[in-house]
Image (spheres, grey):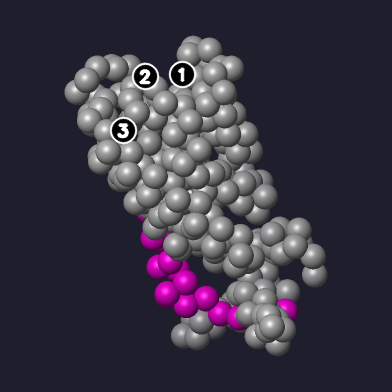
Amino acid sequence: MGISNLLLITNHHLTIINPMTTSAPEIYQGQFGEFTINQSDRSGVIIYRAALMVAALSFAIGSALVLLNNNSTVLNAITPLYACFSLALGVSLLTIHIYLAPLHRLLQVFWAIGSITAIVLAFSNTEPLSVTVYTHPLTLLGVGFTFAALTGIYFKEAVCFNRLETKFLTPIVPSLLLGHMTGVLPSQWERVLLGTWAMLFVLFALRKVVQAIPPDIGDKSVFAYLKAQKHSNPVH
């Protein structure tokens, strides 16, 4: 089975074998066999979605403060808000279900690089982190990895669940960051893109709250198949 097929599999297409059984867990028919969903699976999805909500709200509050009331007090408040956003994003990347383990690990590495860079910048400069990044666009070569990881989540949700807001978020994030880093975007357009990003991020997080849990868990038979393939084909 190709990589594109793996990315597109969701529990929307799974068949429940014994829906009438109340005492036993439901059995789903996956791509490579039957599987069940346990409480640990469900808890992981809840944590993923809660962390996404915290990240979205932290980002939206910080963006609103910058766009509506840009002063020294606000700029200092952005740093703890960004820390909250980054930590919540890290939890999301820890608990998200992605079939391809190398891709999952890559997003986590991106987050780590961006987080370490932000910590170094925050402690090595006397000005607020937001001011450092805004006035020195090349710092996005490091901090931007965090947003590359976030874009990976947007892309995954757009591909797997056909979410309209994440289809917009996927190009908005790199457009804004690259546009600022290269200096090609007027400040007014940067404000528009930042505000749009914040609103769509919150909308995305809210819509995840009301989504059924099994689709976010995915087809566990695929995870089992890929794990078995890895063990049967060790790298020498």
Kindly identify which numbered label has been placed on residue 67: 2
Quadrant occupied by the N terminus: bottom right
Contact between marks 1 and 2 (CB within 8 A): the answer is: yes
Q: Which mark is residue 147?
A: none
User: Is 4 displayed left or right of 116 in the figure?
Assistant: right
Magenta span dominant secondary structure = helix
Q: Is residue 41 magenta?
A: yes
Give the residues drawn in magenta, as a range: 32-50
Q: Residue furthest front?
A: 124
Q: Nearer the viewer, residue 165 or 86?
A: 86
Residue reaching furthest to the left: 73
Q: Earlier in the sequence, mark 3 or mark 2?
A: 2
Q: Amino acid at mark 2?
A: Leu
Residue at (69% x, 83% y) in the render = 236
Give the Cα distance between marks 3 and 2: 16 Å
Report the amino acid beneath label 1. Arg
